[in-house]
Image (tube, rainbow, N blue to C red):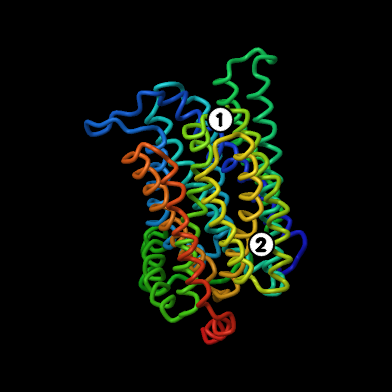
Amino acid sequence: MKNDKKTIFGWCMYDLANSAYITTVSAALLPIYFKEGIVGEGGIDMFGMSVSATAMWGFMLGFAALLVFLFAPVLGSIADFSSAKKKFLLSFAYFGSMFATLLFFSRPGDVWYAVVLYICTQVCFVGANVFYDAFLPHIASEDKMDSVSAKGYAYGYVGGSIQFGVALALVALHESIGIEQQLAVRIGMAMTGIWWAGWSMFTVKYLKEVKTDTQLPEKYQNTPKVFAYLSIGINRTINTAKKVGNFKQLTIFVIAYMIYNDGAHTVTSMAAIYGKEELELGTTHLMVTLLLVQVVAIAGALIFSRIAKGIGARRAVMISLVLWSGVVIYGYFIHSAMEFFVLGMIVGIVLGGTQALSRSFYGAMIPESASAEFYGFYSVFSKFSAIWGPFTFGLIKQITGTARLAIISLMVFFVVGLILLAFVNDEKAKEEKLRY
C-alpha cells in the first residue's frame, strides 16, 4: 500500500475536508461571533466574577484539549489491535461535521450552547486526526514521508482557503444578498460541517487499510467486544507509555514538540480575537488576513519540505521556530491592519512547515506496527501542551487587561522548544526504532 497514488490521494482529501472547520469556524468566524454576537461586551458571569469572551475562548480551547488528552491513546491502541483506524477516523469525522453544522443555531445569549457544541466539534476534529496521522507510516515510505505529509497539509490549506473564501464572501456581501451579518456568519459555520462530511467521501472510497487477523486473547473470549477492546486498549496504552521511555531521542523530541506546538497553537487560535479586541480591526480585515494565512501556508508547507530534503526535517523545524519567535515579537508591537496583514503572511509561511515536518519527523522515529498507539500519544502530547498556552493567554489577559503581554510571553515556548530540538540526534533515533 505504500506510495500508492490513490491511497495517498484519499488520505490527503481528508485534510481538504476537515480544514474547512478549523479555518472557518475555529480560527475565524466563531471567535469573533462568540465575542460580539453570543457573549457581547458584558462578558460572562462565572463564579461571581465577570470573564471576558477572550479569556473564555482560551479556557474552552484548553478544556477541549484536556478531553482529547484523556482518551486519545486508548483509542489509538484499540485501533491498532482491531485494524479499525479508518472506522474511527470516519466516525469522528461525521460526528464532528454534524456538531459543526449545528453551530448554525447558536444565537446571541446562547453562551453554553455554543461552548458545548464547540468543545464537541473540537474533540471530534482532534480525535479524527489521531487516526488520520496514524496512516502516514503505512502509506508512505520513510524517504517519502516528509513530502507526503506536506502534500496532506497543502491539500488542507487549499480546502480551507476555498471554503473560507466562500464564507468570507457571504459575510462581506450579506447586505447585497439581503440577510443580516449574524445570519451570514451562522450559514458560513454550517457550511463547514457540510463541506467536511461531503469531501470525506473521497477518503471513504480511496483510503485503504491493511487488515490484520488479530484474535481476542482467550481471557476476553466471553467478554462483550466493547469491554474487551477497552481493556486491551488501556493495557496497550500502559505498555506503550513504558515503550516510549525506551526511545530517548523520541522522548526529547516529544517534549520539545509539546512546548513549541503550544506556542504555535495559541498564536493561530487566538489571532482573530486578538485582532478584534486588542487592535480593534474590522471583521473584513481579520477575515482577509486569515484567508491569506491559509493561501500562504500552502507554499509554506511545500517550501519547508524542500528545505527538509536538503538539511533534514529537524533542522528545518528549528528554522521555523526562529521565525515563530519573530512573529510574537512583531505581534506585540503592531497597531494597524496592514501590520496584521504582514503578520499573517509570516505566520502562513512558518505554520505549514512546522506542522507538516513535525508530523513526518515523528512518523520516521516510531515503529510502524504500533503507529496509531504512538500517534495517539503524539496527539496527547500535542493537546496536553495546547491546554496550557490558551489557559496562560486567557489568564494573562484577565489579570493585566491587555493581550499584548500574553502574545509576547509565547516566545518562551519557541525558544525552549528550539533548544531542546537541538539535542535530538537523528541517527540515534533511527537506531532506537530498529531495535524495537
Name the side, left or right, on which 433 lies relative to 313. Answer: left
Q: Position of residue 30 (x, y in %)?
A: 51, 33
* Secondary structure of the residue carrying numbered label 2: helix
**Identity, as a three-letter code, of the amino acid under mark 2:** Ser
Residue furthest to the top in view is: 178
Q: How many numbered discs sit on the rendered protein?
A: 2
**Identity, as a three-letter code, of the amino acid under mark 1:** Leu
Residue furthest to the right in view is: 5
Rendered image: mark on residue 302: none
Name the side, left or right, on which 10 lies relative to 279. Answer: right
At a point 41% along the width and 35% down the height, the residue shown is: 115
Res. 352 visible in picture: yes
Indicate whether 404 appears above or below 53.
below
Find residue 43 and report its image quarter: top left
The answer for how far apart the CA atoms under marks 2 and 1 are is 34 Å
Indicate whether 408 appears above or below 135.
above
* Secondary structure of the residue carrying numbered label 1: loop
Indicate whether 370 appears above or below 105.
below
At a point 64% along the width and 59% down the height, the residue shown is: 353
Q: State the residue position of label 1.
A: 281
- Seen from the viewer's position, the closer of residues 388 and 71 is 388
Q: State the residue position of label 2.
A: 149
